[in-house]
Amino acid sequence: MAEKKIKQIAIYGKGGIGKSTTTSNLSAALSDMGYKVMQFGCDPKADSTNTLRDGSYIPTVLELLRDKGKVDAHEAIFEGYNGIYCVEAGGPAPGVGCAGRGIITAVQLLKQQKVFEELDLDYVIYDVLGDVVCGGFAVPIREGIAQHVFTVSSSDFMAIYAANNLFKGIQKYSNSGGALLGGVIANSVSLDSGYQRSIIDDFVERTKTQVVQYVPRSITVTQSELSGKTTIEAAPDSKQAGVYRELAQRVDEHTESKTPNPLTPQELREWAAKWSDQILAAESGEVRQPAESI
Amino acid sequence: MAICGNPIERPRFSCMLGGVLATISALPKTIPIIHGAQGCGGSLSQGLMLGGAFGTGYAGNSAIPSTNITESDVIFGGEDRLREEIQGVFEVMKGDLFVVTTACMTDIIGDDAKAVVDSLTPLPKPVVFLETGGFKGNSYYGYGRLIEELFLQYIPKAEKKDPKAVNIFGLVPGYDPFFRGDLDELKRLLNALGLTVNTFITNDQTQENLLRAGEASLNIMLSRVYGVDAAKTIKESHGIDYFVTDIPIGAAATEVFIRDVAAKLGVAQQQTDDLLKAEIRNYYMYIDRVTDIIADTDFQNYVVVVANATQALPYTKYLDNEIGWLPAYVFITDGLDEDQQALLRAAFDEIAFETKPELVFETDTFKIQQYIEQKNPQFLADEYYPTISPAFVLGSTIERRLAEVLNGVFLSVSYPIINRVVISKGYAGFRGGLNLFEDLIGALLAGR
């Protein structure tokens, strides 16, 4: 019998952009589709999997390592919604130690103990702090860990800046068997207002990637999170749950990721300035098209 | 076996922590406390063996206290481990001065070692703190930083200076393999001028020398690059003037050195003249007796000097000015920045050579050999070109191969030296000049 190929996905994005919300809903939706899923939080805050476990925190891999010196990976795995395996890497207190090394250690610990194979997983989804500030946060995209990377971004310039930085990381490791880019999950994008969507569309075109799903801002998500649940669990019939299920469907069907084409700092500045001018013009009612086009 | 284009290079120095540990090992009853992984202290201490078998010292090598941090300390921060280690050290180690040093890992993760030391104050003995992540510089840089911090954190300022007291800096224990003999000789000469001399790192020194260093009127810097920044800081903090010079080797250079220092300290002219007269007479009485064998030997040699920024020029100057040899190439092997190179080049240009050698900044042993082979016609096909022959190589033990290629004679004088032990011998001053002469002629005759 051929060995089952576990699909390993890393989800990056600027802090506070909605990574964990998106990831948890993606995990929940994939689980509902019948897959065995593990969600692996790679953020020292260790709150990635909260909404899969009724808002509760779980002991992290690094806490166990600190307290016991040696960790049996099973002690760090907790079941959440619909049997999803939840793991948090954890990390040091803010301002001390090396969080990046913590991520490397936690990821390698699970990999070495071959728990993914043992649990017969279909999906491992890494939820990673997205600024890729050092090598540790790049470990899921290095050779042998994740195969596909998705980045969560809004149309805010700083979120796009973080996404562009991530693309640089992916490009760097692309020649040595690292993960490639599946696309952008456009989060908090108003589908009514034209320019938010246009900014992201323009960015993915410039960087030679794609938008996998547009996720609108929704009060349903906030309500679900406040009750410690994903939208999939708390409001399965809502429109927003449908958006996440569609995202899961597309991720499941996704097979071929690519090397992105990140913008240089100069290109990014010029690109942002161009959009800034356009938005300002639109809001002040300035007409920019040639007269004959009106 | 053919040598490939990019062989793995052999080291001619270690990291910042290496230089700091070497210096601490030579300071009187001074104990380092390393905040780093277990490899740092042990490996760097082993590196000292390459300085002419400069061994363990009072609390060196495996006796060095170290936090030996593990992965957990790297992730969560190792400050608690350091606190525990410092407290432990005071229970089991007897020392007069302690120096907390860091290593690459602890500096990268940003452990605040100074805050740990501060939080434990007051401690039973003085503790100096220094960030010594190896990536900050090489061992020579580490030496200079330690001197600077000893003055800033430990050595009291003295309002009243002793007009006849001097400190000598610039030689790094182990990495300048003859530092003890060199300093002993210079101290002997300066004592004879009526001066009080602090060397800090020779056998006769105690903590008293460190504690009274602030009373000195002059810091004599025997390196044009290493420790000079510290001298500038000390001038501001302790009001001690400094004098940058080279290690004087042989009668001519030492006479100039003595006269320079005497003038700066206001030593009576007659006293200086009397000392020099006696020393020079003694020097040449020794030389006189050995001239018979020199006349019998193929004595004058072309020389290649391969040494660090402190030693290369003084050795070359001695060979040309003092004994009339023909330096062909001078290779300075430290990784120097452009300003440091310019400074050394200017000093080199001031030396009055009979035949000016070529000065090259290169660390790589293979490239040094390659440079000579490519520049020098004797390695080309035409046999009528002039050659570097007879050749003599003064370098580290690594240069043995170069001497073979040049079909020349070899004497190890610079780090690493593994083919002989260096105990009390020095090459500085009058006695050092005779020692070097003895070793050069000895090497020429060794094959008889």
Image: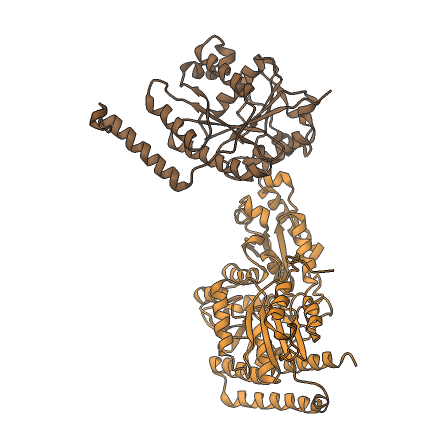
Q: Image quadrant of residue B185?
A: bottom right
Residue at 31% x, 32% y is A276
x and y percent of residue B277 in the render? 58, 91
Residue at 69% x, 52% y is B92
Residue at 68% x, 59% y is B47
In this orientation, which residue lies closer to the viewer: B388 or B393? B388
Vertical side of B165 occupied by B150: above or below: above
Q: Residue furthest front?
A: B382
Vertical side of A35 occupied by B7: above or below: below
In the image, is A231 to the left or to the right of B202?
left
Q: How many marks?
A: 0
Which quadrant of the rendered structure holds the C terminus of chain B?
A: bottom right
Q: Residue furthest left?
A: A291
x and y percent of residue B387 in the render? 64, 78
Rendered brown, the chain in question is: A
Q: How is the image coloured?
A: by chain
x and y percent of residue A244 in the render? 49, 16
Which quadrant of the rendered structure holds the N terminus of chain B?
A: bottom right
Residue B206 visible in the picture: no
Residue B368 visible in the picture: yes
Q: Residue furthest right?
A: B448
In this orientation, which residue lies closer to the viewer: A232 or B155? A232
Rendered orange, the chain in question is: B
In the image, is A14 to the left or to the right of B173?
left
In this orientation, which residue lies closer to the viewer: A57 or B370? B370
Q: Image quadrant of residue B139?
A: bottom right
